[in-house]
Image (spheres, rainbow, N blue to C red):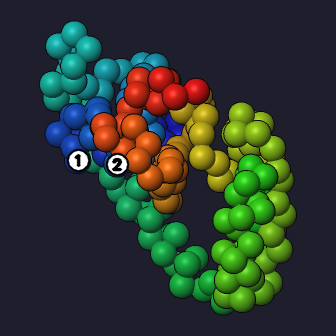
Amino acid sequence: MNIHQLRSIVELVNNDFNVSATAEKLYTSQPAVSKQIKMLEDELSVSLFERAGKKIKGMTPIGEEIALVAQGVIAQIDQIKEIAASDYGSQSGTLSIATTHTQARYKLPEVISQFNARYPNININLHQGAPAQIAQLVQQGDVDFAIAAESMHLFEDLVTLPCYSWNRGIVVPKGHPLTEESISFEALSHYP
C-alpha cells in the first residue's frame, strides 16, 4: 500500500467516481489511476468500488470504510508537508533535477538563481539527457524530479505536472500563400 493508491481512492471519491477528472486532478493518466486502484484492491483482496463493466458506479461497504481512513491519512500527510514547509529557512541538502539540454541552457538558469537566493543551503545537481532518459532517472529514484517538454506520457507510473506552455509559430514572408488560409499540418505539407 502506498500514498499514490490512497490518494487515488480519495480523489476518485471527491470527483464522483469520474476517473478522467481524478486523473486530471492528480496530473496523471486514467490508466495510471485505474492501475493504482487495482493494485490496492489486489493487495487488500477486496473490491473497493461497485462497477458496471469498466465504469465505477459507487463504493462497496468495505470501500467506504477504507476511503474514510484514507482521507484521514492523506490529511495527516498534507499536515506534515505544511509543517515542514513552514521551516523552509533552515533547510539544507541537495536537490537533483533531470532535464533536457534545452531546459538546462535556456529556461532554468534564472529559476535556479532565484532558488539559490531563497534557499542558499540547498545544492542543485542537474542531470541532462533525452526525455526518456530523464524519466527513467526519476523512476529509478536517482533524481528528485525531471523537467521535460515531451515523451513523459510514456511513463504511466510518473505524475506529470504542467508548469508552462510552449508557443510555436510559423514565420513566412508577407504575401505567402499560408497567410491566406487556415494553417494546418496538411496545409504545411504543401510547402516543403
Q: Looking at the picture, which amino acid does disc 1 mark?
A: Asn
Instruction: Check if mark 2's residue and mark 1's residue have beta carbons within 8 Å.
Output: yes
Label placed on residue 14: 1
Determine if residue 119 is in view. Answer: no
Please give the residue where the numbered disc 2 appears in the rendered image: 25
Q: Nearer the viewer, residue 179 or 18?
A: 179
Q: Nearer the viewer, residue 150 or 191?
A: 191
Q: Is residue 49 above or below residue 152?
A: above
Q: Earlier in the sequence, mark 2 or mark 1?
A: 1
Label 1 SS: helix
Q: Is residue 32 above or below residue 70?
A: above
Determine if residue 45 is in view. Answer: yes
> How busy is the neighbourhood of tag 1: few (under 14 within 10 Å), some, or many (20 plus)?
few
Number of numbered discs on residues = 2
- Residue that appears at 84% across and 63% down: 125
Q: Position of residue 84 (x, y in %)?
A: 58, 76
Q: CA distance from mark 2 to mark 1?
A: 10 Å
Determine the image quadrant of residue 138: top right
Q: Looking at the picture, which amino acid does disc 2 mark?
A: Lys
- Residue that appears at 30% across and 37% down: 181
